[in-house]
Amino acid sequence: MIIGTTGTLGAGKNTINDYLVKKFNFINFTCSDEIREELKKRNLEDNRDNLIRVANELREIEGNGFIGKRIAKKIIDQNIKKASIDGIRHPDEVIELKKAGNFFLIKVDAPIKVRFERIKSRGTLKDEVTIEKFREQEEFELKSKNKYNQQIAATMVLADYSINNDSTKEELYNKVEEILKKIK
């Protein structure tokens, strides 16, 4: 079984994947880690701007589904039975992951003010980022006009299951468990 997560920034994708690993012994893959490997090769700083820029460059060179293809190959080659994949950002990645078989995509979202506060509290936003700037960045990631950029909105449409994460972690965990029961 392969569970992928997609959704808006700060919605709870990491939290879902961490839960799958800790509670159900999934092996976790992070789409961003595939790009981080490339940043290391290029001696580039690991920051959000470089991650986005290099991922977009690689999509142009290797195709929009390259991250999904790379991760699916690792799962198959290592004969992993339960894998979770965090941060799927392009519909073609979903297509590649579906080729591995038994793949399910969960869309997670929450109101923008809730997500902005979560991000600020975990310290991943610089102090000068306002909710307006946050909204601008998100809009770019959701619906870029460039087909090689992130296409989160189009990816979210492909989800098999949807979670509105506007409550507690415990409630989120309950929703994840309900989805797992439906899949089995």
Image: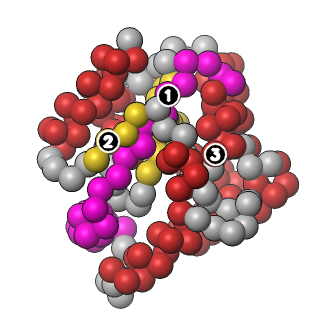
- Please report the residue visible at 24 percent of the width from the left and 33 percent of the height from the top: 175
| Residue type, numbered disc 2 | Ile
> Residue 142, relative to residue 90: is it above or below?
below
- Please report the residue visible at 82 percent of the width from the left and 48 percent of the height from the top: 62
In terms of image quadrants, where is residue 146? bottom right
- Disc 3 residue crowd, few under 14, some 14–19, many 20+, Cα 10 Å: many
Residue at the outermost bottom position: 128
Determine whether the residue tagged by mark 3 lies in a helix, strand or loop.
helix
Report the magenta residues as a range: 99-124
Question: Is residue 175 shown to the viewer in this render?
Answer: yes
In the visual, does 175 lie left or right of 1? left
> Residue 181, relative to residue 63: is it above or below?
above
Q: Are marks 1 and 3 in contact (CB under 8 Å)?
A: no
Q: Quadrant of the C terminus?
A: top left
| Residue type, numbered disc 3 | Pro
Residue underneath mark 3:
91
Question: Is residue 41 shown to the viewer in this render?
Answer: no
